[in-house]
Amino acid sequence: MTVQVKDMVLEKVGIGPVSARVYQGAEFGKGAPIVLFFHGGAFLESGIQAGIKESAIAESMAKAGAIVAVPDYNAPLGNVFPKPLEVGYSLFSYLANKRASGIGDRNSLLLIAGEEAGGNIAAGVALKARDHYADALDGQILISPLLDPFMGTSSIRKADGIGMRQRWTEGWSHYLSGGGCHPYAAPCLCSRIAGVAPALIFTAEDDPLRDETVGYAVRLKAAGVEVRQHILPAGAGWPSIYGGKTDGTSNWQENVSREFKSFVQELSVQRQLH
């Protein structure tokens, strides 16, 4: 499916106007799922050019029939917690209330998603939605989320070779520089995660964030949350997010499209049953 990309401004968000890049399959149908997707960037990047870029993951979900909005969530208030989360939650609330106003319609499923630092924001918004607006969020998609400020897992210790561990250290220091470490800021440290929206979780065997991603999936499952977990094999090209190389035999984008489509179908069935 051909994907159309357009830049727009979401004018009536509670915290003020937010710029966004919207990915939309040319043949999307009525009731197409809406995905609010938070880009990565180690808590440091912002701006249409710097932070949003061209997102292969957003494009993959759009090819599966979704309307994917990638907001510049750091720009309105800055990128120190809790400001990015406040923007993220305001955007989620806006889309939940205004599905018929330019993005999707009243029959659309509403999901949040994010990669790396954006996966942290998505997980935090899912927790806050559980606490304040539970019925509005249909699902969450966490793509190698950056969840653990202590960065003590085995897989992340191996990240020194690609230069990401130092960048993430700097990013965490900046993100938490406002003081304290609220559970919304570091979801892996949250003691109460039951009741959050169903989750689709991606990582790869050679991903530095694999261990904390899988660990969070295990905790969600133990708390009774419905989880679909997909771990791509080593060499699938997934580390290209961090500048890694593919072995040329796998296409992680096709995996994302396929798993996302199945996840949406399951959520649609659950909505009909309830």
Image (cartoon, rainbow, N blue to C red):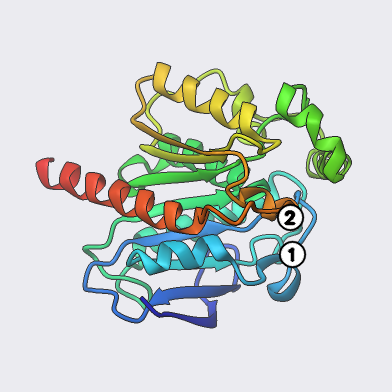
Measured as percent of width and height from the top left, residue 200 is found at 42, 41
Dot 1 and dot 2 residues touching (CB under 8 Å)? yes
Whether residue 264 sits left or right of residue 237 in the image: it is left
Between disc 1 and disc 2, whose residue precedes? 2
Q: In the visual, does 170 lie left or right of 190?
A: right
Tell me what residue is drawn at x 18 percent, y 46 percent.
271
Q: Residues within 10 Å of mark 2 (few under 14, many from 20)?
A: many
Q: Would you identify the image quadrant in which residue 157 lies?
A: top right
Residue at 62% in and 52% down: 237
Q: Position of residue 156 (x, y in %)?
A: 75, 31
Crowding around mark 1 (Cα neighbors within 10 Å: few <14, some 14 to 19, many 20+) is many
Identity of the residue drawn at 78% across and 44% down: 175
Q: Is residue 50 visible?
A: yes
Which residue is at the far left? 273
Which residue position is annotated with label 1? Answer: 46
The residue mark sitting in front, 1 or 2, is 2
Question: In whole angstroms, how far apart are the C-alphas of marks 1 and 2?
Answer: 8 Å
Instruction: List x then y, in percent, for residue 62.
Output: 41, 68
Q: In this view, does 194 lie above or below 82?
A: above
Q: In this view, does 183 lie to the left or right of 194?
A: right
Location of the N terminus by quadrant is: bottom left
x and y percentages locating residue 7 in the rendered image: 56, 82
Secondary structure at numbered mark 1:
loop
Label ID, residue 252: none
Please tell me whether mark 2 sits on a helix, a strand or a loop.
loop
Residue type marked 1: Ser
| Residue situated in front as seen by the camera: 252 or 149 | 252
Q: Report the residue marked by disc 2.
A: 41
Pick the front one: 60 or 34? 60
Residue type, mark 2 in image: Gly
